Amino acid sequence: MDPNGPKGPDDPDGLSASEPLSHGLKQRHLTMLGLGGVIGAGLFVGSGAGIAVAGPGIVLSYLIAGALAMLVMRMLGEMSAAMPASGAFSVHAERALGRWAGFSVGWLYWFLLVVVLAVEATGAARIANGWVPGVPQWAWVLIFMVVFTVSNLAAVKNFGEFEFWFAALKVGAIVLFLALGVLAIVGWLPDTDPVGLANLTGRGGFLPNGWDGVVSGVLAVVFAFGGLEVVTIAAAESEDPARNVARAVRSAVWRILLFYVGSMLVIVTLLPWTSMVPGQSPYVAVLDSIGVPGAGQIMNIVVFVALLSALNANLYGSSRMVFSLAERGEAPKGLLRISSGGVPRRAVLASVAFGFVSVLLNLKWPDSVFLYMLNAVGAVLLFVWGLIAVSQLRLRRRIEREAPERLTLRMWGFPWLTWAALVAMAAVLVLMLADPGSRPQVLWSGAATGAVLLVAGVREWRTRRTGS
């Protein structure tokens, strides 16, 4: 197998490369994965920290961060519709910039997923332990990991069904929250009066901490948009990847922005921003304020499902990424073994094995070893997004020249909006370096990225030296 991917003499750039994996995912799976894949604990719980620093201006913070995520998703959608591949942006980076880029972005993203997987497994186990204290937290982690490993080892449609219903519950919860919030704002719920704009304009105004607060809010929420990328990885295992990924991206980006920005607007309109406590869900606070019984437990269930959904999606995404790396000669060839059902079982087991190691580190040393690992992937998402943007800049011209009919989904305002997204990513990194709380993430992530780039460079040098 060609280490650079399956290519033919009439297709030197691999534009027509086919995938050996199963094609068991349906359009509804991809659409719901695109909608629900990014809705997680970062929104339901983590948004409180953003509100605490930005006040009502958190709405602008989410608009800015969401706009950046939408641009990245549109770029990725354009490339994935033209060149569907299980490695998605890793394959695109290799075709655009060379093997070093595909190797680097692929392994960085794999590392990011398996470390975050541990956070999600541990978070879900803590909630489950609260419900059933007789079962220790480590046992819950083991149960979740085994269940989703078995699911991912079976036919890919099992993954699709799990994610479809997980995402449906999360999307349904957001829609219901928005509906109740709007009714409460206009005073149409029992025992409620119209709230007006007092919470938006009082207590320091809409921007109580100025634009500095909005910027701090962006830093607090931008990484909550991570997870959108998995839909383009999954598209390679659907019946019509080019059409399906284009439809999934189109339906996802605007609705996700509506869910995020809309729910933030509801929260800061109904409640004083000064009442927000970082680490506590503002959604629970809103539901309590409008008299929804058992609001805390309802949100616990939603967050629990969100964590399991993210665990499932990250295990899937990491296994397909390492399989793609092996397919191109950037990971051990033994990972290429595919089951009769078209599932890369060894890639799944390799990913879950490291996931188990991460979980053990999280349970044993959450404030030392695991904290360093978490910091090492803290800003990796921005590096991955940056390589996606650079790859799109180079591949767009090539596709227009060699296969323009494949551009079924086009990046808006090319190339200006792509460059604007790159500038925004650089600005976020600079701001994180200037912020004492975020600086360790940038430094550790920079070190991890530098280490992977060094390995990629050495491999490139050895390949050129040996001529193979």
Image: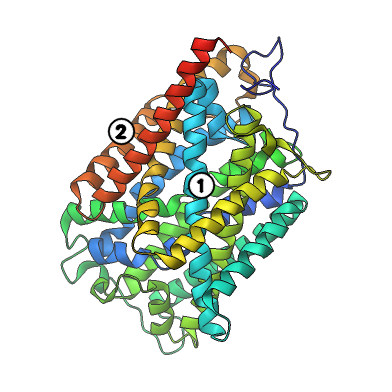
373 w.r.t. 247: above or below: below
Q: Which residue carries the number 2 mark? A: 423
78 w.r.t. 44: above or below: above
Q: Give the mark nearer the N terminus: 2 vs 1.
A: 1
Q: Is residue 82 left or right of residue 65?
A: right
Report the residue that reaches farthest toward the right.
340
Q: In this view, does 204 lie to the left or right of 87?
A: left
Residue 83: name its quadrant: top right
Tag on residue 253?
1
**Residue 373 location (% of width, % of height):** 39, 52
**Residue 433 location (% of width, % of height):** 22, 44
| Image quadrant occupied by the C terminus | top right
Q: Looking at numbered disc 1 in the image, what kind of residue is underneath it?
A: Val
Residues under labels 2 and 1: Cα distance?
Answer: 21 Å
Q: Residue at x 79, y 44 (%)?
A: 339
Q: Residue at x 42, y 55 (%)?
A: 224
Alpha-carbon neighbours of circle 2 within 10 Å: few (<14), some, or many (≥20)? few
Q: Looking at numbered disc 2 in the image, what kind of residue is underneath it?
A: Val
Q: Is residue 461 visible?
A: yes
**Mark 2 in CB contact with mark 1 (< 8 angstroms):** no
- Which of discs 2 and 1 lies nearer the camera? The answer is 2
Q: Which residue is drawn at 63% across and 16% down?
A: 403
**Residue 424 location (% of width, % of height):** 31, 38
Numbered-mark total:
2
Q: In this view, does 412 lie to the left or right of 204?
A: right
**Residue 307 location (% of width, % of height):** 53, 64
Q: Nearer the viewer, residue 133 or 287?
A: 133
Tag on residue 233?
none
Q: Which of 352 and 388 is in front in this view?
A: 352
Q: Which colour scheme is used?
A: rainbow
| Image quadrant occupied by the N terminus | top right
